[in-house]
Image (cartoon, helix red, strand yellow):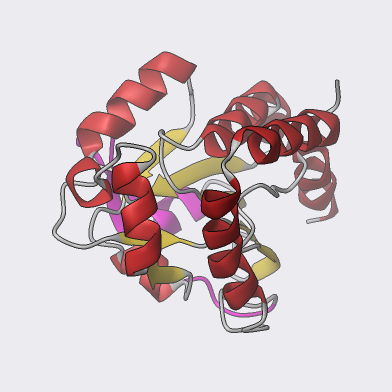
Amino acid sequence: MTFTQTLDQMRQEFIANTPADVYNELFRLINGQQQAGNAFGLSEGQKAKDFTLNNSLGQAVNLYDELSQGPVVLTFYRGGWCPFCNMQLRSYQKVLPQIEAIGGRLIAVSPQSPDNTLTQQEKEDLQFQVLSDTNGLTAAAYNILYDVPDYIQDIFLNKFNLDLAEYNATNRWILPVTSTFMIDESGIVRSAYVEPDFMKRPDPEDILEQLRRL
């Protein structure tokens, strides 16, 4: 199946297997964020915010150092507990050789703890940089960070048995709006995909096409 077909199937299965009360609360959050319009994310043409974060091995990775070697595909995801995120990163891993052949680099950022990032990277055999933004400072700089509302915290704790603050090794319940930014070597955002619906992700083939245009 194509990326889009796989994503659509996952979405249908998630909706079918999720109790109506949980589904309604999750989409209450999604709809509220979507109605905010352009409230989230950097826009095309803006300067990308520089950052330094640690990868799963504790090594510091700087965005502009990476940009000195080629354009960067920067994607923000929720964490290794999210099946849609895992599917996205696996799909991006498959096209990583093509990304690198074009001269690009791939960086994925989530708020999860370095230990959970290492576990995810080893489990999914990800060969690109996977960074931990545990306090959400980088996500905030890209204007995609939000505080998880109480009614969603309740669902995570009581329905999914997930304490997000503990998982992320912080004292806040925070998440990024799922986003992917294409950044050229001069640090300019050339495209921005910012989507509050966590069940939607950019197709890796579209990313490759955008890279080829740089």
**193 drawn magenta:** no
**55 drawn magenta:** yes
Q: Is residue 116 left or right of residue 5?
A: left
26 to 203, vertically: above or below: below
Q: Is residue 182 left or right of residue 64?
A: right
Q: Quadrant of the N terminus?
A: top right
The residue at 41%/41% (across/down) is 79
11 to 139, vertically: above or below: above
> Where is residue 25 drawn, in percent x and y?
52, 61
* Among the 4 quarters of the image, the one containing residue 112: top left
The residue at 52%/71% (across/down) is 48
Q: Quadrant of the C terminus?
A: bottom right
> Where is residue 200 drawn, in percent x and y?
70, 49
Q: Is residue 68 left or right of residue 173?
A: right
* Among the 4 quarters of the image, the one containing residue 196: bottom right
Whether residue 101 is visible here, answered yes or no, is yes
Q: Nearer the viewer, residue 147 or 90?
A: 147
Q: Is residue 199 left or right of residue 21?
A: right
Whether residue 148 is visible here, answered yes or no, is no
Q: Nearer the viewer, residue 62 or 202?
A: 202
* Among the 4 quarters of the image, the one containing residue 31: bottom right
111 to 119, vertically: above or below: below
The residue at 85%/54% (across/down) is 213
> Where is residue 26 drawn, in percent x and y?
54, 57
Q: Nearer the viewer, residue 188 or 43?
A: 43
The span picked out in magenta is: 45-68
The residue at 21%/52% (across/down) is 165
> Where is residue 189 drawn, in percent x and y?
63, 69
